[in-house]
Amino acid sequence: MEHTSTDNEENTWSAVLATMPRPQQEPYDDDDALPPDSLLIEVPESEGSPHNQEAGPAGFVRRAARAVHTRIQDISSQAADAPRLGGPMPPPRHRSQATYGDGRIYSASGDASTAWSRRSIRQPRARDSTALSYRERALRAWRDAKHQDEFFCRVYAYYTGKGALTLILTRVLQLATLLFVVALSTFVFGCIDHAKVRKQKSLSAVVIPQCASHFSLPATLFLWAFAAFWAAQLVRTVLDIPPLLEIRAFFTEVLGVQPADIGTIAWHEVVNRMVTLREVEIREYRNLTKSRILGYRLTADGIINRIMRRENYMLALFNKDLLDISVPGLGKEQVLTKALEWNLSFCLMNYLFDERGQLRRRFLKESNRAILSEGLRRRFKFMAVINMMFAPFIVLFLVLYSFLRYFEELYHEPGTLTSRAFTPYAKYKFRNFNEVPHTFRTRLSSAHPKAALYLSQFRNDALIAVARFVSFVAGSFTALLIVFTVVDNELSLEFEISGHRTVLFYIGLFSAILAAARGMIPAEEQEYLHPAWIIRDALEDLQYMEPEWRGKLDTTMVRRGFESLFTYKLLIFFHELLGVVTAPFIMLFSLPGCAEKVIDFFREFTVNVDGLGYVCSFAAFDFEKHGNVKFSAPTRAPGEHLASKNGKMEQSFLAFKAGYPEWQPRDQAASIYLQR
C-alpha cells in the first residue's frame, strides 16, 4: 500500500524541539542493581601448539578480533571519498552549508553528517492526531520514550520485509494460506464419504450434505477456535497498516531511504542514520540536562537491544543450559521443536515482561523467588494441558500443510529427502547476542555447504553398499515399468500390480526410492579433503565450538556432536510432528523443575541501562560482571557461573563491533578488550 504525504509546506529548524516532549526513562534502582566486583588480571599464556591455539575456542576470539579490525579498515577505506553519516556535528548555524537537489544538507567540506533536510525532523504541531500526516505521526512515535521497543521493532520489520506493501501482502497471503489448508482439510476429512469414493465417478456423489452438522464436538470446538484466531489475526493485520505507513514515511521522509532502495541499503547504515538523527535533535534542543541527554541519546547497541530484548534472554538461557527440554524417560537429549519454542516464549516472555516489553521489577527481588517460581510452574502445566487438547488437530494440520507445500519439490527433486539443515536447538546455540535475524541467516547460509561437505567426508562404506544395491533394484523396476508403459499406454492406468495399485503408482514409488538411494552414494569424482580443514571453516562461520572438540576436529566424536546439530531435513520434520505430542510431557514433567533456576537467572543476569531499561547483561557486554579471561577478557567475572559458556559474550561483542564499526562501547573494560 503506497502513501504520499500531502504536507508540502516549507519547514525550518526554528520550531524543532522547543515543544519536543522530554524523554522518559526507567528510574535506576540502586537496591536492584548488581554491583560489579571484578578483578583486572593478566591473561594466562595459552597452552599447546600454535595450530591448536588457532583451532580452539580462544583461537576463535583471536581470529574474530583480527576480522573486526580488518572489517573496520575496509569500511573506512570504502567510505573515505563518500559522504558519511554519524560523527560530530555542531549546530547548523555554525557551519557553511549548501543544499543539493536531493534535499540533504552538506557542509562546505562535503560532509553529509546531517543528511536530512531541515523539515525532516520538524516537531509536529499540536493538533488532533487523526489530522496528522504519517510522517508527523512517525516523528511522534520516534520521540515517544515509553514505546521505543515497539517503534524500533517496526523499523526492523519494515526493513526485513522490504517495504510496507511487501510486508502487508506477505501477511495477507499467509492468512490466506492458513485458511486454505484448514478449509481443504476440513472438506477432505469431514465432508466426503470415503466409502463411496471407489464406487462413484463424480465429486457431487460423494459429498456429504450439510456435513458441518455431523462434525464431532472436538472438531467443532477446534474450528471455532481457529475461526476466532484467524479473525483476530486479520484484524491485527488491518490495524498494523497505519503504523507500517508511518514507518514508511519515517524511512522515506526522515531517513531518506526510498522504497526502491530498501532492498539494497545495509542495516547498519539505517542504524547509523537513526543515531545521527537523534544527535541532531539533542544538539538543537539546548535545554536538555546531561542526565536527560544520556537517557535520550541513541547508540547502535541500544537500538538492537530494544529489538532483541526478549530474544537475548532466550539465547542466554540456552547458552547457560538452564532449560531441560528432554523427553521424560528417553534420556537427556535436548530436542527443540517449533511447538515447544512457541510454548517457551509464551510461558516465559509473557510472564516476565509487561506490555511495553520491560522486565517486571518484581522478578528482580529475591524475596519473590518462591512465589514467582510456583507461578512459572503453573504456567508450564497449564500450557501442557492446552497442548494435549489440540495436539491431534495440530498434527493433522502440519501433515497436510507439509504435504501441500513440499510434494512438488519432493516429486521433482527426491534427493531433498537426504539433504540436511541446522536444527532449531543448534540455531539457539550458534546465534550471538544482539545478532539480528537476517544477519544470522546469512551466517548459516555461508556455513551450510561447508557443513554438508564436512559430513560427506565420513563415508559409511556399508551404508553406501546397501544404497548401491537399493539403487540398482529400484532402477531396474522403474526401467521395466517404463518400458511396459511405452509399449501399451493404457497399461499405466488400468493394469494393477497389487490391490488397486497401478503401474503409474509404482513408477512414482520406485523413482522416489531410486533418487533417495542415489543421494546417499557419493560421487566417484568427489575429492577427499581432510575433515578438520573443512569443519574449521564451517565453525568459523558459525562462531561456535565445544571445548571438548579442541584438537579433535577429525574424530568421530566431533562428527557425531556436529551431526546432532546439522541433521537430515526429514528427521527434523518427524521431530516437529512428534514434538506436538511430546511438548506437553516436557512442560508437565521436565520444565517445572527448571523454574527456580530460570527465576534466578533473570534476577542475576539483568542490568539497568540509562535510557534503555532492563536488558540481559550479556547483551549489554558487561565485561566487569561476565568477563572470561580464557577468551582474553580484561577482567574476570566475580563467579565462574556468571561467565557465558564457550566465550559467547566475547564472541558476540567482536561480531557486533564488526557489524557496526562506527559504534563505540560505553564500558571501559570493553574498550580495553577491543584494543587487544
Image: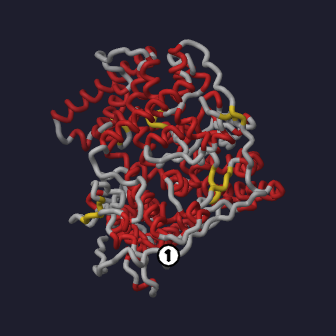
Q: Residue at x 42, y 49 (%)?
A: 402
Task: Between residue 475 and residue 531, name the one nearer to us.
Answer: 531
**Residue type at the position of mark 1:** Met
Q: Residue furthest bottom?
A: 128
- Measured as percent of width and height from the top left, residue 252 is found at 32, 66
Residue at image x 29%, y 25%?
Answer: 475
Residue 86 visible in the current orientation = yes
Q: Residues within 10 Å of mark 1 (few under 14, many from 20)?
A: some
Give the residue at the far top of this rendering.
Answer: 49
Front in this rendered view, residue 503 or 582: 582
Q: What colour scheme has been applied to the protein in the rendered image? A: secondary structure
Q: Horizontal and vertical percent for residue 189?
A: 46, 59
Q: Is residue 120 above or below residue 74?
A: below
Residue 389 seen anywhere in this rendered image of the structure: no
Q: For residue 45, which quarter of the picture?
A: top right
- Give the x, y percent position of residue 262: 31, 57
The N terminus is located in which quarter?
Answer: bottom left
Residue drawn 73% across the image and 56% down it: 376
Q: Is 298 situated above or below 43?
A: below
At horizontal 24% and vertical 27% (from top left) the residue drawn is: 479
Q: Position of residue 566 (x, y in %)?
A: 49, 32
- In-image side of 112 versus 284 (left or right): left
Q: Is residue 609 left or right of residue 186?
A: right
Q: Which residue has dot 1 on it?
A: 20
